[in-house]
Image (cartoon, helix red, strand yellow):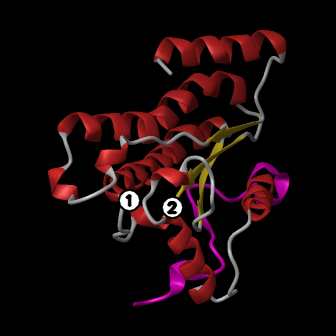
């Protein structure tokens, strides 16, 4: 969405509701060919698109939403993945975009915190979704994850939703700038 479209959407929310208590950012995109092969061969335009859609969109949405969230103990939650920290085959430019997204969370915390808004990220393990179907080998990743994660089970969408509900609730009122892992403990494993 363009900045104008984001502003228009927030304007409609402002007119119809008057405020915003929480915002979910669940946008990510990279051209399929940018996910495969060598990361070093990533085309400039594919890199730009991935970062614009997957990371800058959070910045634009947070900025547009802030007037509706100010002084409400509001919460913004975005979705990330372990590929932001570690090399994941067939993730390539999306890993770099998710790293930029997580850095944006930290910078937004600095800007929005004094206004009373919190910003956090949820790093879920691999889940079969429409978006994840673009990642080559996702079914194998899900199987491997379930076999190796300390909880020895696949991640469920409901677990991710529960974490988001926690981050939107007053129970997490002192938590901001965090990446909450919902991956059955997979992120703590070594090689």
Q: Position of residue 60 (x, y in %)?
A: 49, 28
Q: Residue at horizontal 28%, vertical 38%?
A: 46
> Dot 1: within a 10 Å radius of its alpha carbon, few (fewer than 14), some, or many (20 or more) residues?
many
Establish if 185 lies above or below 137.
below
Establish if 170 lies above or below 29.
below
Q: Do residues under tags 2 and 1 come within 8 Å of each other at their CB atoms?
A: yes
- Mark 2 or 1: the one toward you: 1
149 inside magenta stretch:
no
Judged left or right of residue 103, residue 119 is: right
Q: Position of residue 128 (x, y in %)?
A: 63, 59
- Observer-nearest residue: 101 or 172? 101
Mark 2, secondary structure of its residue = loop
Mark 1, secondary structure of its residue = loop
Q: Which residue is tagged 2?
A: 81
- Observer-nearest residue: 22 or 160? 160
CA separation in Å, label 2 and label 1: 10 Å
Establish if 36 lies above or below 191.
above
Q: Position of residue 149 (x, y in %)?
A: 60, 85
Judged left or right of residue 93, residue 151 is: right
Q: Residue at horizontal 63%, vertical 62%?
A: 127
Query: Where are the magenta residues, as a range?
Result: 167-191
- Observer-nearest residue: 1 or 67? 1
183 inside magenta stretch:
yes
Q: Which residue is tagged 1?
A: 91
């Amino acid at each position: 969405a363009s900045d104008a479209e984001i502003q228009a959407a927030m304007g409609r929310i402002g007119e119809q509701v008057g405020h915003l208590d929480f915002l979910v950012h669940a946008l990510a995109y990279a051209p399929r060919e940018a996910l495969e092969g060598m990361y070093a061969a990533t085309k400039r335009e594919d890199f730009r698109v991935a970062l614009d859609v997957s990371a800058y969109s959070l910045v634009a949405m947070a900025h547009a939403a802030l007037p509706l969230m100010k002084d409400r103990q509001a919460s913004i939650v975005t979705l990330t993945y372990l590929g932001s920290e570690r090399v994941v085959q067939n993730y390539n430019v999306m890993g770099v975009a998710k790293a930029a997204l997580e850095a944006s969370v930290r910078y937004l915390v600095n800007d929005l915190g004094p206004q009373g808004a919190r910003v956090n990220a949820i790093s879920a393990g691999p889940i079969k979704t429409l978006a994840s179907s673009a990642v080559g080998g996702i079914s194998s990743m899900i199987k491997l994850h379930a076999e190796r994660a300390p909880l020895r089970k696949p991640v469920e969408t409901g677990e991710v939703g529960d974490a988001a509900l926690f981050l939107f609730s007053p129970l997490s009122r002192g938590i901001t700038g965090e990446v909450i892992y919902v991956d059955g403990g997979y992120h703590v494993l070594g090689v």
